[in-house]
Image (tube, helix red, strand yellow):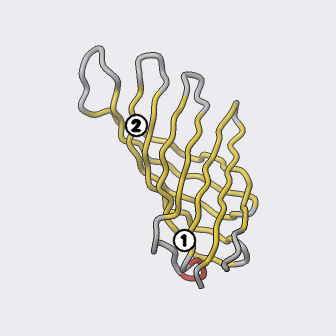
Amino acid sequence: MTTTTLATGTIESKSWDQTEFAVVPDAPTLGAAKGYDLYTGDIEGDAEWQGLTCTLPDGSGSFDSLQRTRCTLGGRSGSFILRMTGTFDPTGNSRADWSVVPGSGTEGLTGISGTGGYRADDGTNTYTLTYRFDR
């Protein structure tokens, strides 16, 4: 049996850029977004991501994105890709569920799998990742 480990910590957003596309008057707004984040805690490193957003007139909405995370985790270093789906409210609070894309681990993180997510509430961004290594 392979042991799973829970990683926790915080995320600091360092950049965010979004461009609207397929604009239709009086309809939800579609956007393409990208950004750069720093991770601290059990995951120590950085991440670049790109995604798509759908924002409703009240400012709430949803998003889907892919993120390459370059980090040290559990004493191993390398990178892996997270696929995430989430929601946000009009105040900017957001949450997402994510999973490691199978086969995306590199170097010391080869064979990683896992699931988790993040919550951003009132300026505090926390994450969880329950992970394991197949080798």
SS class, disc 1: strand
Residue 87 coordinates in the image, percent (x, y): 51, 35
Residue 74 in which image quadrant: bottom right
Q: Position of residue 20 (x, y in %)?
A: 33, 32
* Image location of residue 9, percent across then percent down: 74, 54
Q: Quick one: 109 or 99, which is closer to the camera?
A: 99
Amino acid marked by disc 1: Ser
- Taking the view exactly as shown, the residue that stands out farthest to the top is 26
Q: Is residue 106 above or below residue 58?
A: below
Residue shown at 51% from the left, 78% from the top: 106
The residue closer to the viewer here, 20 or 107, is: 107
Q: Quadrant of residue 93?
A: top right
Query: Could you classify mark 2 by the number of other residues whose Cα lies within 10 Å: few (under 14), some (14-19), or many (20 or more)?
Result: many
Q: At label 2, which amino acid type do we have?
A: Thr
Residue 79's label in the rendered image is 1
87 vs 8, left or right, is: left
Cβ atoms under marks 2 and 1 closer than 8 Å: no
Quarter of the image that includes the N terminus: bottom right
Residue 88 appears left or right of 23: right
- Quadrant of the snapshot with the C terminus: bottom right
Which residue is outermost to the bottom? 135
Q: Secondary structure at mark 2?
A: strand
* Mark before the other along the chain sequence, 2 or 1: 2
Residue drawn at the location 52% of the way across and 63% of the way down: 100
CA neighbours of label 1 inside 10 A, class few (<14), some (14 to 19), many (20+): many
Residue 112, percent from left and from top: 57, 73
Q: Nearer the viewer, residue 13 or 57?
A: 57
Q: Residue at x 33, y 32 (%)?
A: 30
Viewer-proximal residue among 16 and 60: 60
